[in-house]
Amino acid sequence: MKRQKRDRFERAHNKGFAAGISGKSSEACPFTTADIKEQWLGGWREARAEISRGYFT
């Protein structure tokens, strides 16, 4: 059974979220394509918001 590839945008968002949780800077984005970079930054912002709400330490 073939595994379906993950969506690039979803993967970029998840990677950005992980980077935000680990405390990395928004400048650490590894993507250069604008639409994928936006997804990464969206995940990063979401993670930073979760930290400020106290969900992560």
Image: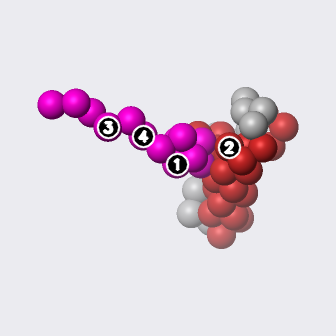
Is there a contact, CB below 8 Å, between mark 1 and mark 3? no
Q: Residues within 10 Å of mark 1 (few under 14, many from 20)?
A: some
Q: From which residue to which does the magenta span run?
A: 1-14
What residue type is disc 4 on? Arg
Tell me the SS state at disc 1.
helix
Tell me the SS state at disc 4.
loop
Relative height, residue 31 to residue 11 (above, below)? above
Q: Quadrant of the N terminus?
A: top left
Q: CA distance from mark 1 to mark 2?
A: 9 Å
Q: Which residue is mark 4?
A: 6
Q: Earlier in the sequence, mark 4 or mark 2?
A: 4
What residue type is disc 3 on? Gln
Q: Which residue is mark 3?
A: 4
Image position, residue 49 (x, y; %): 69, 64
Is there a contact, CB below 8 Å, between mark 1 and mark 2? no
Image position, residue 26 (x, y; %): 80, 43
Q: Residue at x 65, y 69 (%)?
A: 53
Q: Residues within 10 Å of mark 2 (few under 14, many from 20)?
A: some
Q: Which residue is mark 2?
A: 36
Q: Residues within 10 Å of mark 4 (few under 14, many from 20)?
A: few
Q: CA distance from mark 4 to mark 2?
A: 14 Å
Is there a contact, CB below 8 Å, between mark 4 and mark 3? yes
**Nearer to us in this view, 2 or 50:** 2
Q: Which residue is mark 1?
A: 10
